[in-house]
Image (cartoon, rainbow, N blue to C red):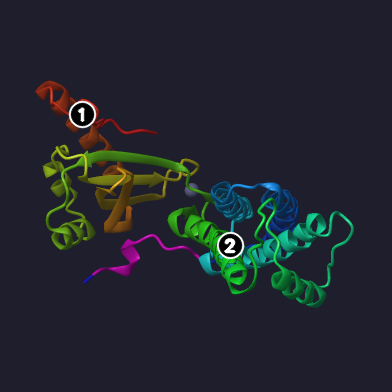
Amino acid sequence: MANPNAYYKLSGKTPTTAIPVTLSVGTLSAAVLGFAYAVIIYYMPFVYINALCTIAFGIGLGFVGAFMVNLTKIRNPMIAGLLGLLIGLFAEYAQFVAWLLPVSEWNDTVFMPGELWAVLKEVNKVGVWGFSSTPVKGMFLWIIWMIEALIIIGASVGIPYLGVVNDVFCERCDAWADDQTTIGPFKPIANPQQMKQDLEDARIVVLADLEPADDETQFSLITLTRCNLCNELFVMTLQNVKVTYDKEGKPSTDETDVIRNLLIDQATHETILTLADAHAEESDDAGTPDDDIDLTPTA
Ligand SMILES: [Zn+2]
């Protein structure tokens, strides 16, 4: 059985000032970016570029949220996601308020949400579409607006949420543990259950059996995270990684945790780093054909 104490866990803490500070910066950014976005969307005649703008707007907001969550030391992913949701909803509101400006030929817009909704319903009946001669309207426009909202709000929520989930915070130092080293690639872990058990039982010697990867589409990676302020918090994650290519040759990576956020001690941390060096030398000596596979730890 897994010992729950053997794993790093987020404390779930949120400093009191973090919420108003994150919300203020987030909504201000949403207003500024939303205005720019709405104007570009209105005047841009290329639908494909419009779609890219929507994604960029969502990702931009997500990164602002994640940055603020990190800066204000929010260690609760639910709070991070909820703040992202509020920022995303505000961004939706702001971009529609801004969008009505060019729609009304820079004469007017509305700020009250109820009024805004009523105006949007009217605009939807008539349809507006920049330079296009046949306006998009009705159900089709509602669907476009819905997809747009899903992208913007989804990215606003998801990026800060994942940022907190994937980071390690040192409560002792009141700081994020930023010192991360990736080691590998190694051959995939054939028996993840066994490996997990071995590592939980501190039999790290099993890692010495890992061999350098010989397949660029299937391998495993070790990630070591250390708090370099106190040098007392060490966390290890081991993942199997699969790279698949779609018809157009675009790669996508699928990572499966063999073990995630296992707390280790300093000696183990050093040992794993030594293993990485040993493997690096080994593969140098052997002169492996995969010259592009680098086994040296990257700081
Ligand atoms: Zn620390």
Question: Quick check: 37 above or below 298?
Answer: below
Question: Quick check: 118 above or below 137?
Answer: below
Q: Label 1, secondary structure: give it.
A: helix
Question: Quick check: 214 above or below 110?
Answer: above
- Magenta stretch encompasses residue 6: yes
Left or right: 246 with respect to 151? left
Taking depth in this image into account, of 68 and 106 the one nearest to the observer is 106
Q: Label 2, secondary structure: give it.
A: helix
Amino acid type shown at disc 1:
Ala
Left or right: 159 with respect to 136? left
Instruction: Point out which mark residue 166 bears.
Output: none
Binning the other alpha carbons within 10 Å of mark 2 as few (below 14), some (14 to 19) or many (20 upward) gives: some
Left or right: 64 with respect to 5? right
Q: CA distance from mark 2 to mark 1?
A: 47 Å
Camera sees residue 121: yes
Is the magenta region chiefly helix, strand or loop?
Answer: loop
Q: Position of residue 25 (x, y in %)?
A: 72, 54
Q: Which residues are magenta?
A: 2-11
Q: Position of residue 210 (x, y in %)?
A: 14, 43
Camera sees residue 16: no
Say whether marks 2 and 1 touch (CB < 8 Å): no
Binning the other alpha carbons within 10 Å of mark 1 as few (below 14), some (14 to 19) or many (20 upward) gives: some
- Residue displayed at 68% across by 57% down: 129
Where's the C terminus, which quadrant? top left
Q: Which residue matches tag 2?
A: 148
Q: Quadrant of residue 279?
A: top left
- Residue displayed at 79% across by 78% down: 114
Taking depth in this image into account, of 158 and 204 the one nearest to the observer is 158
Q: Which residue matches tag 1?
A: 280
